[in-house]
Amino acid sequence: MDAIRCKLLVIGAGPGGYVAAIRAGQLGLDTIIVDAEALGGTCLNVGCIPSKALIHAADEFEKATHFAGDNPLGVSAGKPKIELAKTVAWKDGIVNRLTTGVGGLLKKNKVRVVEGWASFIDGKSVTVKTKDGDQRIRAENIIIATGSAPVELAFLKFGGDVISSTGALALPAVPKKMAIIGAGYIGLELGIAYAKLGAAVTIVEAMDKILPTYDKDLTRPVEKRLKALGVEVILGAKAKGLSKDRKALEIEIDGKDKAIPADKILVTVGRRPVTEGWGRENLALDMDGRFIRIDDHCRTSMKGVYAIGDVTGEPMLAHRAMAQGEMVAEIVAGENRRWDKAAIPAICFTDPEIVSAGMSPDEAKAAGFEIKTAMFPFSANGRAMTMESEDGFVRVVARADNHLVLGLQAVGGGVAELSAAFGLALEMGAVLEDIAGTIHAHPTQGEALQEAALRTLGHALHI
Amino acid sequence: MGVHVIKLPDVGEGVAEAELVEWMVKEGENVSEDQVLAAVMTDKATVEIPSPVEGKVTWLGAAIGDVVAVGSQIIKLEVDGAGNAGPEDAAPPAEKPKKPAAKKTEEKKPPPAPEPKTEKPKAEKPQTKSAPVAAAAISGAPRKEGEKPLASPAVRKRALDAGVDLRRVAGGGPAGRITHDDLDAYFQSGGAAPAGASRVADISVKEIPVIGLRRKIAEKMTVSRSRIPDIVYVEEIDVTALEDLRSKLNAEKSADRSKLTLLPFLMRAMAKAIADQPQMNSLFDDEAGTVRQYGGVHIGVAAQTDGGLVVPVVKHVEARGLWDCAAEIARLADAAKSGSASREELSGSTITITSLGALGGIVTTPVINHPEVAIVGVNKMRVLPQWDGSQFIPRKMMNLSCAFDHRIIDGWNAAVFVQRIKSLLENPAMIFIED
């Protein structure tokens, strides 16, 4: 079969890849995007979006449960029931709408979509196994956006009742007992959701704290909530495998073995970049540990070959991949671009939510800055009170000498949306006086950001 | 907040005034201790003025090109604490030393001395600013080395599109943030680079004031070329034997001696040739109609520095040995490059050598260092085939391009002088034979 030729070939249609393709299309580049599975990658199909749908359903269910009992709001309702299969179908509907939307956007921008598994022949060409046979594509520029996949444990392979996050998003019914290995953000988000849906959840973590990448102040409200939801968290424990009858997870803690009965065992011990299976051996890419090494233009060690997204390293976040994809498309179009972002906000959709942008106080100190920092608690925020969501705070980290804001963090109900303000402040190079001098609408949780900045300056008004 | 006044320091023996050649700071800028504020030039030495304190520049007392008297106020800084300003210094800086407007026509006239005390001292009037301490601290602090420039995404994109490295743009916003205005100012100042990838016609014209050392060079060259009818004489020299000797001497030299270049040999050869033809070693005062023929051979060695051409002088070559010449050349070259050469070391030559080393070309037409009467130009050395009578053999060849003031030196004399040097350099032992 004749090779198709194009200016830009994108391998992988996740958030990094499809954004790169759309932007390339906008810039008039002849672009092809290849993916063996549905458009949207992990994020749209088995990641960000479906998990948030499940979390929303769980929140609503939990609210109904709350109203079934005695509550200060004076609402009374009957005991709720959930038909998880229906929830999953609803979630699938959303996913379908979004992936179809991505398809429409690609089409609108004249990007050709080739469905199939791509494998490199050399730095300029790939073979795609499509359902109609092998298709060769030759491109002047190629973006590798192959993403990441859940890490599998050798002694606890996925299959049957051992599931990955993908499996946890498509369960037919709420399991009675669920054991989760790994207390990172994925394990906690799903664990909290299933706990709210009525499962007895046990989370096993090898480290001595949950969400190891966040500081204690940020994780404390989550720990408190886990306790209230009856989620058992076992720290410093090592998963060993399934019990003989396959009905329990065996773990080792303080040198002692213990069995945790479980209908489903969810393994969320991290994600690994997908660096195999697409002909990397036919290329000469420099690696950076497990990841493909890139520079500040997302260039790999091969000319005309770029890499973006999870396959290039931490943080493995969709919005990082999107920004990289947009940038590379512009670079291929001949524009002068360089990775110069000040911050990549990160969010845990736990209950309560955690959002962090820029540096934590410890990170800022480790980077050699003399800092000023203060937090403003939601217990002093009117809007938080009216939402029965007083746990948590907003925290500001700034340079002591010139008040440049180095980091913004928050934990609390719904604080994920503060990430927009956090990101903007950091990207614009705001100083404390900028945030303190911006009118924040009342009554909102966002006022806590302004108050935290004021408090860092030494004159908070409402505390 | 106090005011710290910086006066033009005594920049050299017998120097009463200096020309301000560069401001490294502008009004409103924050400066750190030891940061260089300005450069002034006296005759040929340029002196940098560092800041003794940390503070914010509130007043600059002269414009570039102004001639400023030693001891007059040139900069005022707003500093934490009391500062060093007496009541009279704190008066508003209404009387900047005026730019010598008459300068173009009456060149030598001293500039009006600044008289900062003419206005009655106003009672201790601190800067009216009463902003909180933070305001001063957060605005426009100079970026430390290696610190990332701070700018909004829109400013960053504009800079990238224009091919501007933001590290080169000063930020005037809070915490040193680079604003659109800062970028505009950068473009207007001519810092703008042509747009990145695409080729566009560049219609910009940049006006560069010819000041300081550059002006001095321009004046000297004009005098030389307009007054001196010169004769240029080029001869090729076989330096194979000289190079052998030089590398042998360098290989066996003691560690404390500086490495020999060709120049010390040439100097010694010139001194020997001048002994036979002393008229080469003179200064011609054409206004007085007098030639001053010097006994001492003071050879100027043209040296390129970042600021331009300077000519440090090796004095009394006739009394110096080969190694001595080499050491003196090395010392003077370092001093000239670092700007620490004294006035005496940069003047008093009676004949000059100009050499660009590997960049020396094959022929040059050197400009005589007025009022001298001769200049010896050294061209590059290369291996060329030479006919020895039966075959071609590779020899190290080098040209000397010499210029002479034809009013004083006849062509015949010029030829004899260069041939004598050629003979000495081709048979280097002769350089060292006492007569």
Image (spheres, rainbow, N blue to C red):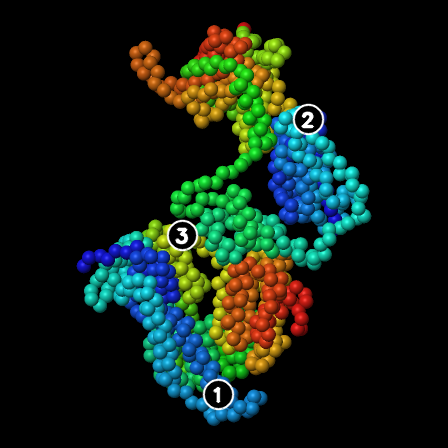
Q: Is residue B162 above or below residue A373?
A: above
Q: Is residue A143 above or below residue B239?
A: below
Residue closest to the eye, B26 or B205:
B205
Give coordinates of residue B430: x percent, y percent. 49, 10
Q: Is residue B282 visible?
A: yes
Q: Is residue B189 left or right of residue A239?
A: right
Q: In the image, what residue occupies the spot 49% across and 88% down?
A: A65
Q: Chain of mark 3?
A: A
Q: Quadrant of residue B99?
A: top right
Q: Tell me the residue that label 3 is attached to.
A: A335
Q: Tell me the residue that label 1 is attached to.
A: A64
Do marks 1 and 3 both belong to one polypeptide chain?
yes
Asked if labels 2 and 1 touch by Cβ distance under 8 angstroms, the answer is: no
Cα distance between the residues tagged 3 and 2: 56 Å
Q: Tell me the residue that label 2 is attached to.
A: B109
Give coordinates of residue A437: x percent, y percent. 62, 64
At label 1, counting other C-alpha atoms closer than 10 Å, the crowd grade (few under 14, some 14-19, many 20 or more) is some
Secondary-structure class at tag 1: helix
Q: In the image, what residue occupies the spot 67% across and 46% down?
A: B57
Cα distance between the residues tagged 1 and 2: 95 Å
Give coordinates of residue A447: x percent, y percent. 59, 71
Do marks 1 and 2 both belong to one polypeptide chain?
no
Q: Chain of mark 1?
A: A
